[in-house]
Image (spheres, coloured by chain):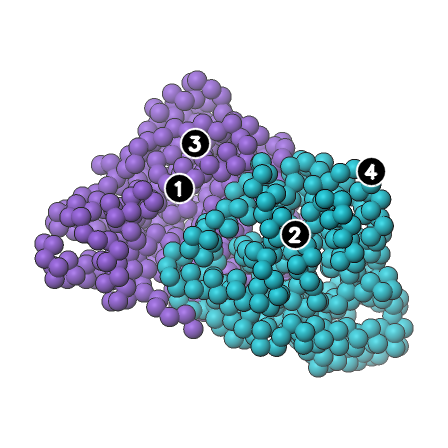
Chain colours: A purple, B cyan
Amino acid sequence: MIENTPKLFIPGPTEVDDRVRIAMAQRVIGHRTKEMTELYGGIVEKMQKLFNTDHYVFVFTSSGSAVMEGTIRNLAEKDVLHGACGAFSKRWYEMSLANEKNADLVWADWGKAVKPEMIADAMEKKKYELLAQIHNETSTGVKNPTDEIAKIAHENDTLIAIDTVSSLGGDMIDVNKYDVVIASSQKALALPPGLAVAIVSEEAMEKSKKTRNKGYYFDFVRMLKRFEKSQQHPTTPSVPLLYAMDVQLDIMLEEGMQARYERHLKMREIVHNWVKKRGFELFAEKGYESVTVTTITNTYGISIKELNEELVRRGLRISNGYGELKEKTFRIAHMGQLTPTDIMGLLDTIDEILEAKGVY
Amino acid sequence: MIENTPKLFIPGPTEVDDRVRIAMAQRVIGHRTKEMTELYGGIVEKMQKLFNTDHYVFVFTSSGSAVMEGTIRNLAEKDVLHGACGAFSKRWYEMSLANEKNADLVWADWGKAVKPEMIADAMEKKKYELLAQIHNETSTGVKNPTDEIAKIAHENDTLIAIDTVSSLGGDMIDVNKYDVVIASSQKALALPPGLAVAIVSEEAMEKSKKTRNKGYYFDFVRMLKRFEKSQQHPTTPSVPLLYAMDVQLDIMLEEGMQARYERHLKMREIVHNWVKKRGFELFAEKGYESVTVTTITNTYGISIKELNEELVRRGLRISNGYGELKEKTFRIAHMGQLTPTDIMGLLDTIDEILEAKGVY
């Protein structure tokens, strides 16, 4: 048995409903059976219903990063523009380089959002096949104005893929405005890690059909072909995680995406109010704060590592700042299945620890 | 709850021990914790012990196919030779093409094995960076003489990767003779699908360091760098499947690889004897029969589809022939956690069905 499993207030993996975890323990079925057709076909249908879309839905057995990389290979032979504002969106740019694309970077500084005019400027100078744009930057807690950015991309005949790895299923996103919407299972979708999702437009599919050197495993066209044949995958999918996803989608549909979004807004509000009340500061630029994760400036210079150790002893875990932001910031994820009550309990516990240390 | 979960005698997914399935239902831990370091570090150590190797072990969240593709990108910028003899090894060749490699194909016909001299001939004509060689062809039930083939590859200064997707953990393979040994979780390793393994030599690692355009997610160097730092993954791994793998490796170490191999030989012997006794024929060339899966020629021209439906009603599932071999052959997998008793029960049940139909 795994020991030490605190409640997770980290931006992935997040808390998983008991019913979802237990679903994984079921016996494994063959991936070329009618049971699999029903399972995967049902998952795709539920995803389309939940996100109110007719776009294609593909569920990959991989992390979200892998689908971010795969999306680049599907949609760009050469020229990719990256709209980035933190560690994970910068990594996406590095993925383009690792695949020898001519990648350009529009960089908003740490804590800042990518603005539509920054993208417009870059697109005036050069024609791109694809804009790879961060939606919710997990390292800085910044939400980018992707709706406006998508408009600019499309005006420039450029496809737009957005990284909603840590926001889809928590924040309200109109997936129909984008060509590819990418998400990981273990964030706001509140599944265990091991799956990633791509929601793909007809235009993206047309482009993928013409793209050379796009590889095999993440090829959207190959995924669609097999799905249209039998509502199955070209290769063996992770059966237990599909069991989990099916149950979790039922849970999400029962709550409804609007109620889910409002719950996330409420949790964010509680965290924001606490930040102000205790004299911390929001790291994200005003007006661009993530709905699912708050990055908080460590204004008191406390040891985040020690704070987290204290929290873990009490059965709770938050995140230190990511990379260069370690100890300078800390992160509280308020996403997935967490509730306002969970968040209030966490914040009270942090207060208890910091008050005992005489921080405030 | 998933319904209709017959015992699986198909060449993946295979039967999973209850303890392994139940391990997946545990609470999820963060992937940047010391618990993860212990978990993944322990898995790598157990893999090295089980397969008696100091080679690097990487566990990817993906299907085996994805790591087959990734291996090509790690180890060849241009010239790849494929030793193939069935649907899955041909697919590996197609993966090279999908990644714009100059791929050549040494093709042994359906049911035949790739012979060392065929590889030697091809290597005389051209210098290759990588030989991508099938070990156990899941479609035809053919085991290829990869030890001899590896010798030829190395004499020609060519790296060799072998596809043991459906044999590692069942057949006895000296992984130290190869540069990359690739396996899927859901075959002879008897895990649920969702993970894939690469066992990688120092020489392969050196080559990967120099290879351009190898991508991000499957980059061996990036995997090693993160592992050496913290015994973790560069991106979020599938935590529940790592729980499962840890438990399954304990089960395999307890049995021991030699005993496991002998159990697989015994199961194969039972199937082979039955094939002869009942007037069926082995599809694989004599002397090259797979240790983990037997492909059987449908000499009576029975409906394999109907036979399987009858079996499923009795709680058992075998495989139809793959692709072009559908209905012309059928496949009985004898791998993973199955026992001689399971196999005898299956064969008796097939006899009961076919005798009732008056087939024999």
Left or right side of B77 for B58: left
Q: Name the kind of residue labelled 2 in the image.
A: Asp
Q: Are marks 4 and 2 in contact (CB under 8 Å)?
A: no
Look at the image and tell me whether residue A254 can be seen.
Answer: no
Instruction: State the mark number for residue B180.
Output: none
Q: Name the kind of residue labelled 4 in the image.
A: Lys
Left or right side of B17 for B226: left
**Mark-to-mark CA distance, 4 and 1:** 46 Å
Estimate how packed mark 3 is, as few (under 14), some (14 to 19) or many (20 or more) residues with alpha carbons within 10 Å.
many
The residue that appears at 72% across and 44% down in the rendered structure is B157
Indicate which disc, 4 or 2, sits on the residue closer to the N terminus.
Answer: 4
The residue where tag 2 is placed is: B179
- The image quadrant where one finds the C terminus of chain A is bottom left
Query: Where residue A82 sits: x, y (%)?
Result: 43, 31
Instruction: State the mark number for residue B125.
Output: 4
The residue that appears at 24% across and 41% down in the rendered structure is A283
Q: Secondary structure at mark 1?
A: helix
Query: Where residue B174 sits: x, y (%)?
Result: 69, 62
Estimate how packed mark 1 is, as few (under 14), some (14 to 19) or many (20 or more) residues with alpha carbons within 10 Å.
many
- Circles 2 and 3 on the same chain: no
Query: Where residue B7 sits: x, y (%)?
Result: 65, 73
Q: Secondary structure at mark 4?
A: helix
Q: Are marks 4 and 3 in contact (CB under 8 Å)?
A: no
The residue where tag 1 is placed is: A88
Estimate how packed mark 4 is, as few (under 14), some (14 to 19) or many (20 or more) residues with alpha carbons within 10 Å.
few
- Give the label, 4 or 1, closer to the camera: 4
Give the chain letter at badge 3.
A
Instruction: State the mark number for residue A82.
Output: 3
**Mark-to-mark CA distance, 2 and 3:** 36 Å
